[in-house]
Image (cartoon, rainbow, N blue to C red):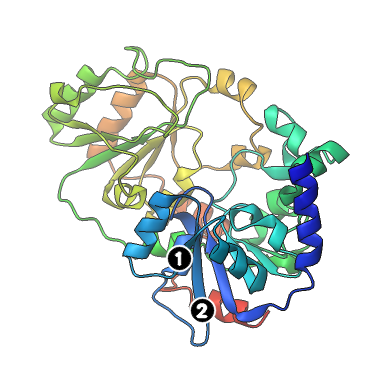
Amino acid sequence: MIDKLFKQLVYFFSGWIKRDSSKWLFASHNDFGDNARYLFEDSYNPAGIRKIWIATNKHEYRLVKNLGYECYLKGSLKAKFHALTAKKYIYTCYVSDIGYQYSRNAICINLWHGIPLKKIEFDIQQGPLVKKFNGSWLSRLKHPEIYRKHDYVLCPSNYIYEYSFASAFKISEKQTLKFAYPRSIFLQNMTKQTKNTNFLYVPTWRDNGRDLLSLDILDLDLIDQFCRERDCYFNIKFHPNTNVEIDVNKYTNISVISNKDDPNRCLADADYLITDYSSIFFDYLVFNKPILFYVYDEIEYKSESREIYPEMGDIDCGVKIYTQAQLILTMGKFLTEKDSYTDRRKEVIKKFGLDSNEIDNSKLYKYLSEI
């Protein structure tokens, strides 16, 4: 508690320190990734801007330094100095990614980490996160970084602002930055690097401990046989919190992608995406390739997890299935029949602001330079 009060005191006095408008700090929530990274590394580099990355751990620090960028470890004296003197904070989730207590009178710009499928921030009405966002004095004392409002939030479309960001972040439309996500631009510029026909399966994390590899959900022997017979591959990328062990040596056409591998490369190399309740399908939409939603536990999952925005029920950009028999059947149709969802995906792509033709983030950089 004393630590929280001290941070509030530091926050107050940080507002009296002169800030350098040419110094921009960048940070992501857990590692060197997401929208903050792709804006930081963008090919467009405006003159007169000093970009500094604030790393959350030593591994991230070494990675960024080895890439040749200016970087400081969060909590170090230099990181604190730059946090107190930089005019712009650019981050993926929260101002605390850089340092809440140093942020008074800095311009805080939240790039967020994706288009929301489940309710986020102040829209959360059920589950363990409710206590963080209920507005009580205890919540404000424990989590001041949440109540330090963002000055601007990157929002690719008006539709996203209307169904989520306006209430979730408690911001006006004037506080939105109507530009494409840097990660989306990065993905659009990627090309497939393999000649293999690849299915990518990305199930979201389930905290109920259900076995994702039970024979009635994902019979890997059956899937491997299917892939061998049709000369295709089934690549699996589990959520980092999912504890599953697969002996891939048993299979010729199945592989498990390490969480250390670049997730964007996995998406770019996939011909078909199979997922469930993960918002990763929004990232994949930029390629306008077939998507399959394998929701074998839909009722159970929705009753136990955070609420899903009701607008998500209107999205029609891929086939929805419930059983493994349907999974195998639909995978076969993907390989042999014409894609019937191309036009419907285009509608969703436009609605969510994923139709950008930009080759870099120069427009966003120029706008940020003027605020």
Residue depicted at x 69% and y 70%? 107
Is residue 97 rendered to the left or right of residue 1? left
Mark 1 residue type: Cys
Is residue 131 rendered to the left or right of residue 195? right
Give coordinates of residue 173: x percent, y percent: 75, 64
Which residue reaches farthest bottom? Answer: 47
Q: Dot 2 corresponds to which residue?
A: 50
Quarter assignment of residue 310: top right
- Depth check: 205 or 2 in front? 2
48 is higher (above) or lower (below) than 236: below
Is residue 97 rendered to the left or right of residue 70? right
Is residue 322 rendered to the left or right of residue 139? left
Which quadrant: the N terminus? top right
For marks 2 and 1, give the one nearer the viewer: 1
**Is residue 178 among the parts visible in the rendering?**
no
- Depth check: 259 or 188 in front? 259
Q: In the image, which disc is placed on residue 71?
A: 1
Residue depicted at x 53% and y 59%? 27
